[in-house]
Image (cartoon, rainbow, N blue to C red):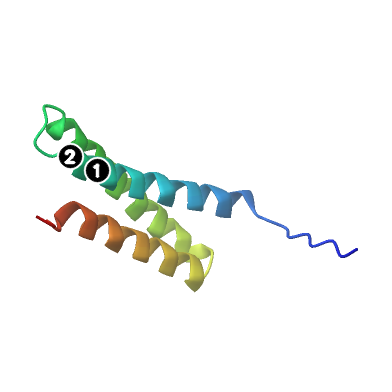
Amino acid sequence: MILLAFAVSPILCALGLVQILGLAAATGARMVEGTRHERSGHWLCLAAMAMVGSVCFLALRLGPDSVAACAVTLTLMTLIAVTDFR
């Protein structure tokens, strides 16, 4: 029986969690467009974008792969928030 064990850093797990929360906030802001919660959704998305941007800056110490993942997440958040599919 082969046992695959990976050493996962808690910092990388936190980085992934912030990225997932950022994408969820951008999607949520897009979903509340036109409702009475639109303003709070936009503020939440802006705060999440600032959080992911800060994490992207801090990920410079973790290496280029982490920075690229953060940059892609920030780009996707911007596209989700701006693009209108109607």
The quadrant where residue 2 appears = bottom right
Q: In the rendered view, would you say 61 is above or below 16?
A: below
The quadrant where residue 86 appears = bottom left
Residue 3 position, x and y percent, is 84, 61
- Give the residue at x 48% y 72%: 64
Residue 43 position, x and y percent, is 19, 37
Tell me, for residue 45, which label it has, or none.
1
Tell me, for residue 24, which label it has, or none.
none
Q: In the rendered view, would you say 64 is above or below 34?
A: below
Helix, strand or loop at label 1? It is: helix
- Give the residue at x 52% y 69%: 63
Work out whether residue 71 or residue 31 is closer to the camera in this orientation and state it.
31
The amino acid sitting under disc 1 is Cys
Q: Label 1 crowding class (10 Å Cα cut-off): few <14, some 14-19, many 20+?
A: many
Q: Label 2 crowding class (10 Å Cα cut-off): few <14, some 14-19, many 20+?
A: some
Q: In the rendered view, would you say 15 is above or below 35?
A: below
Tell me, for residue 42, which label it has, or none.
2
The quadrant of the picture occupied by the N terminus is: bottom right
- Give the residue at x 28% y 55%: 77
The amino acid sitting under disc 2 is His
Q: In this rendering, would 17 be left or right of 82?
A: right
Q: In this rendering, would 85 be left or right of 19?
A: left
Residue 24 position, x and y percent, is 35, 44
Work out whether residue 35 or residue 65 is closer to the camera in this orientation and state it.
35
Q: In this rendering, would 37 be left or right of 70?
A: left
Contact between marks 1 and 2 (CB within 8 A): the answer is: yes
- Per the model, the C-alpha gap separating discs 1 and 2 is 5 Å
Helix, strand or loop at label 2? It is: helix
Residue occupying the far front of the picture = 86
Residue 41 position, x and y percent, is 20, 36
Residue occupying the far bottom of the picture = 64
- Give the residue at x 44% y 57%: 58
